[in-house]
Image: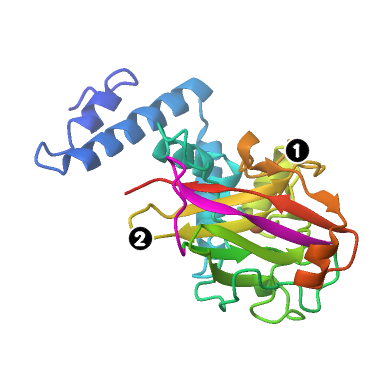
């Protein structure tokens, strides 16, 4: 391997991977090496640019903690997270589309009853969210567990804002025997992804904005079905076609309709007019 050239280097590195290595690991490392080399060649990468990239990754590592993973934010803003989401749900056209988990999920949110309330003291447009959880063939799934979280009117999640209770606008609830669920909340607000680290520097250098359209996050699980992690978005949000992390799918953009139903007001204690969102989730059997 003395006569390494631009033309022979890629194969020389590929040949160093042991034939006994795990086959999937071999496949992934080979792809990575080929693409990295092709990328350097295609862009005529300079030594300074290569060092700049190393420094950028170093800063990304320095910014990362257990609660704030800057690598995931980089993956999100480069569209890699959404690409992997779509690859992993290929051939799943009858299931609800998946969307990014994001960094603000907290496990073990308190349980509310089906039909219960997340509004509490929150200001904002009162909203009733309701629908059904079913299998991809349309069979309702009894008692599916919905884990819901969203931001407050100021754009912040409870774990970013010391003025909110830890579990503000977070809850778990079980759907009914016929798969139906509902809860009252406020209309979520568009917000910016964290900009105070390398991902923010990158967005700025690319001339990109950091905004996400408003959304409500869901993690839905039921025995015998794959967990569904997704979000629903008000379809009239100003950032619906410009999500900084590419999480929006057509099928996840929904209408938050003005409503005045007296029955619902009585049942859920909402102010009129309030908004209603109807959304049915379809889970893929394991
Ligand atoms: C979120 O929706 O919470 C989120 C997703 C990706 C990056 C930052 C935030
Ligand atoms: Fe979010």
In the image, is 259 to the left or to the right of 161?
A: right
Task: Say which of 47 and 98 sits in front.
Answer: 98
For residue 157, what is the image quadrant? bottom right
Can residue 237 be seen here? The reply is yes
Residue 127 is covered by the magenta coloring: yes
Q: Quadrant of residue 52?
A: top right
Residue at the image point whose x is 74% and y is 48% from the top: 213
Residue depicted at x 64% and y 78%? 167
Would you say the beta carbon of the disc 1 residue lies within 8 angstroms of ligand 1? no
Q: Secondary structure at mark 2?
A: loop
Name the residue: 27% across, 33% down: 30
Q: Which mark is residue 207?
A: 1
Residue found at x 70% / y 47% = 233
Secondary structure at badge 1 equals loop
Is 197 placed above or below 279 here?
below
Which residues are the magenta region?
Answer: 126-143
Q: For the residues carrying marks 1 and 2, which lies nearer the camera in this image?
A: 2
Other residues around mark 2 within 10 Å, as few (<14) / some (14–19) / many (≥20) = few
Across and down, in percent, residue 14 comes to: 23, 31
Q: Residues within 10 Å of mark 1 (few under 14, many from 20)?
A: few
* Mark closest to the chain's N terminus, 1 or 2: 1
Viewed as shown, does residue 40 lie left or right of 162? left
Q: Which residue, as the protein is rendered here, is positioned at the far front?
A: 263
Badge number at residue 233:
none
The N terminus sits in image quarter: top left
Q: Label 2: which residue?
A: 223
């Amino acid at each position: 391997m003395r006569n390494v050239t631009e033309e022979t280097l890629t194969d020389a590195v590929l040949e160093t991977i042991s034939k006994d290595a795990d086959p999937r690991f071999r496949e992934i490392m080979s792809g990575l090496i080929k693409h990295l080399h092709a990328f350097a060649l295609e862009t005529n990468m300079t030594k300074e640019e290569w060092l700049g990239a190393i420094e950028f990754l170093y800063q990304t590592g320095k910014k990362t903690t257990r609660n704030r993973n800057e690598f995931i934010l980089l993956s999100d803003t480069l569209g890699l997270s959404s690409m992997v989401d779509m690859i992993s749900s290929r051939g799943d056209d009858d299931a609800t589309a998946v969307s990014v988990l994001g960094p603000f999920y907290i496990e073990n949110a308190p349980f509310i009853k089906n039909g219960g309330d997340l509004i509490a003291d929150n200001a904002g447009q009162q909203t009733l969210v309701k629908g059904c959880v079913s299998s991809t063939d349309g069979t309702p799934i009894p008692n599916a567990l919905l884990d819901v979280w969203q931001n407050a009117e100021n754009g912040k999640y409870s774990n970013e804002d010391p003025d909110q209770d830890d579990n503000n606008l977070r809850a778990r609830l079980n759907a009914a025997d016929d798969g139906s669920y509902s809860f009252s909340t406020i209309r979520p607000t568009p917000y910016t992804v964290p900009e105070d680290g390398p991902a923010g520097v990158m967005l700025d250098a690319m001339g990109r904005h950091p905004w996400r359209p408003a959304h409500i996050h869901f993690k839905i699980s039921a025995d015998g079905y794959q967990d569904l992690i997704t979000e629903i978005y008000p379809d009239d949000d100003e950032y619906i076609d410009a999500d900084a992390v590419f999480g929006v799918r057509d099928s996840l953009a929904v209408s938050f309709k003005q409503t005045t139903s007296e029955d619902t007001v009585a049942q859920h204690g909402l102010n009129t007019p309030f908004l209603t969102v109807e959304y049915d989730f379809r889970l893929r059997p394991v």
